[in-house]
Amino acid sequence: MGRAPCCEKVGLKKGRWTAEEDEKLAKYIQANGEGSWRSMPKNAGLLRCGKSCRLRWINYLRADLKRGNISTEEEEIIVQLHASLGNRWSLIASYLPGRTDNEIKNYWNSHLSRRIHSFRRSASESLPLITETAKEGVLTKGKGGRAGRFAVKKNKNSHTPKDATRASTKKPLMENNTSNCHNSNIEVMQLLQTPAIEKETLSSAINDTVIWDPCEDDKEQMDLVMPSPYPETGRGMVGSSGEKATLVVSHSDEITSGNSMLCPSVGEIENDSSGPFYQGIENTLCFDEVTDKELLDPNGGSTLNEERQDGLVVRSEERENGVLSPNKTVYDSIGYLSSNGESGEWHSCSSISISGFDDWIWDDVMGGHVEGGGDHLIQEDNMLSCLWESDQVEWGGGGTGL
DNA sequence: AAAGACCTCAACCGCTTTCAG
DNA sequence: ACTGAAAGCGGTTGAGGTCTT
């Protein structure tokens, strides 16, 4: 048998916390410590669910919480971590002492995501889908003169009802891809490139770095592909048992460093685009032609060396026990975008696609060693500058900013 | 000054993971 | 090994505030 129910939902207060409630909760936790959220409300004399108490404590009452606005440095860290980790707010928050996942999530949704969006749009005007988005109202200026979340929300709602949004989070594009299974759409759930992540968080993150084939959702088969920018350390590798791999993806002969990822239907994207986001897109490994079986052949030994019509070359070399060799440098930084294949809407998924971006992250933020070079730093600087500036240029509609 | 559009963020909801029984 | 509650997490909501017209 399990435990007794956490709390009775009936008769419990909801909504905003009063100062009195805060005081009760804070005093109780100071006296008794955290934990035992189930019994806490009763013992503290609160008509709240334990879950609500926990949330209130974590997000608001904790003494070590940092108050005030997110600094520019924190902002940069959030952007960079988000590029690597996606919407793993608690993980991102762990790198920002005094900030909560909820706070970061809110900040991202209200500030940063718009900048990213506008940056991507401005960097890729030739992308029809984004242009369409703009037409649909993302960029329309309301009566109040400020464009932004309302339009985005409106647009989002029109495409992703609540349930669908949740579904797309857990098993992205499940529904939408059912009609496109013949095209071997494979969904990337998460890209991780976090050499500094602690063991436990890394393992959980690895679990999210999977290739999901919606065509085979019935058997829920998940395969792992985990490129690593740090072959020498073995961090950020494939598998849960220390297996190592490097997925080598290069576009043309240009060699950069970073991580690699994939996207379905990459062929839709024009090749003559420019800007860092596009570089991420066009360097996307296309699994239309590289099956998960091939990539993760448990027998190993196979080598991919395939050139696409658009010039994308996919290579992997020197596998060990069916995974890719750690001995090779990852050539290209790959972010990804994914299309749901039906509405044509593009999802940024967890990552914006920025070439060399992750190198910058860990080099500057974590102090890690990163192979690569000055070119990337220049590019990254440009990108970041563009992000910050775009807030004014794009959303201010003439420099008004936020 | 008023109205409406838009923004912010605390809190809720529901799902997944963890772990106690 | 199994069950189910607790804990944790991410997505969403909505009240209240701000800004523009």
Image (tube, coloured by chain):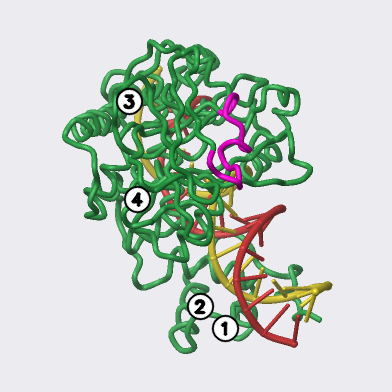
Chain colours: A green, B red, C yellow
| Crowding near the residue tagged with mark 1, few <14, some 14–19, many ≥20 C-alpha atoms within 10 Å | some
> How far is disc 3 from disc 1 in space, using C-alphas?
53 Å
Estimate the x, y position of residue A260 in percent, counting from the top left.
Answer: 43, 36
Q: Is residue A293 one of those drawn in magenta?
A: yes
Query: Is tag 4's residue or tag 1's residue first in the polypeptide sequence?
Result: 1
Number of the front mark, 3 or 2: 3
> How far is disc 4 from disc 2 in space, using C-alphas?
48 Å
Number of the front mark, 4 or 3: 4
> How far is disc 4 from disc 1 in space, using C-alphas?
51 Å
Residue marked by disc 4: A231
Q: Are marks 4 and 2 on the same chain?
A: yes
The residue shown at (56%, 38%) is: A295
Q: Given the image, what chain letter belongs to the residue carrying mark 1?
A: A
Q: Given the image, what chain letter belongs to the residue carrying mark 2?
A: A
Q: Where is A218 relative to A273, above or below?
A: below
Estimate the x, y position of residue A23 in percent, counting from the top left.
Answer: 46, 77
Q: Which mark is residue A44?
A: 1
| Crowding near the residue tagged with mark 2, few <14, some 14–19, many ≥20 C-alpha atoms within 10 Å | many
- The stretch of residues the image draws in magenta is A287-301
Residue marked by disc 3: A276
Residue marked by disc 2: A25
Q: Where is A202 relative to A258, above or below?
A: below
Q: Amino acid at mark 1?
A: Ala
Query: Is tag 3's residue or tag 1's residue first in the polypeptide sequence?
Result: 1
Give the secondary structure at mark 2. Answer: helix
Q: Given the image, what chain letter belongs to the residue carrying mark 3?
A: A
